[in-house]
Structure formats: C-alpha cells, structure tokens
Image: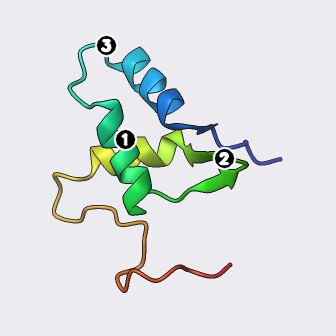
Amino acid sequence: MAALPRMRNAEGVMAELKAQDPDTRITLNFIRGLIRSGEIPVVQAGVQKLVNVDLVFDYLANQGTAQPIRYKNYTGERVRA
C-alpha cells in the first residue's frame, strides 16, 4: 500500500517547516502566496486548501538550481484530471 501524502493547510506547512528549521526566514505569507499562485498543487477540502508538505519542501529545495520545479503548466490553464 502506498504511503499517504502529508496534506496540510498553509499553517500546517509552516509548522512542519519550523519543526525542521526553527530559524527559517520563510513566512506564512510566502507559503500562502505559493498556494494562491498555483505554484503548488492544491486539494480543496471544504473551505481549506490543502497541499502536500513534501511537494512544498521539494519546491523550496530546488528553486536555486538550474532546473527549478514547476508544478503548474506553462500556459497557466488548469490541468484537467
């Protein structure tokens, strides 16, 4: 059986980040901006927007590399499932 993704809202992502790096300079507002812009895939659960914590960490870890991760398509259109 595949492991379940660790889905969190913006505050939960921030708590996980603080647990791993207490001195992080990343803010809750920055995480919310990533979610709002569509840079990170979102699952809508009622009024909450949930994201996979591991995808957020991968996104943050690869932004300074030659091949940054982009989760949304380049046209900006929604991808149909």
Q: Amino acid at mark 3?
A: Pro
| Residue situated in front as seen by the camera: 61 or 25 | 25
Residue marked by disc 1: 31
- Residue furthest out toward the right: 1
Residue 39 at least partly seen: no
Identity of the residue drawn at 44% across and 56% down: 40
Q: Is residue 25 above or below residue 4?
A: above
- The image shows residue 26 at horizontal and vertical percentages of 26, 31
On residue 47, which mark appears? 2
Question: Do the numbered discs 2 and 3 sit on residues whose CB atoms are within 8 Å?
Answer: no
Identity of the residue drawn at 30% across and 45% down: 60
Q: How many marks?
A: 3
Among the two numbered marks 2 and 3 on one chain, the one whose residue lies closer to the N terminus: 3
Q: CA distance from mark 2 to mark 3?
A: 29 Å
Q: Amino acid at mark 2?
A: Val
Residue marked by disc 3: 22
On the picture, is 55 further left or further right than 18?
Answer: right
Q: Secondary structure at mark 2?
A: loop
Question: In what quadrant of the picture does the C terminus appear?
Answer: bottom right
Q: Which of the 4 image quadrants contains residue 19?
A: top left
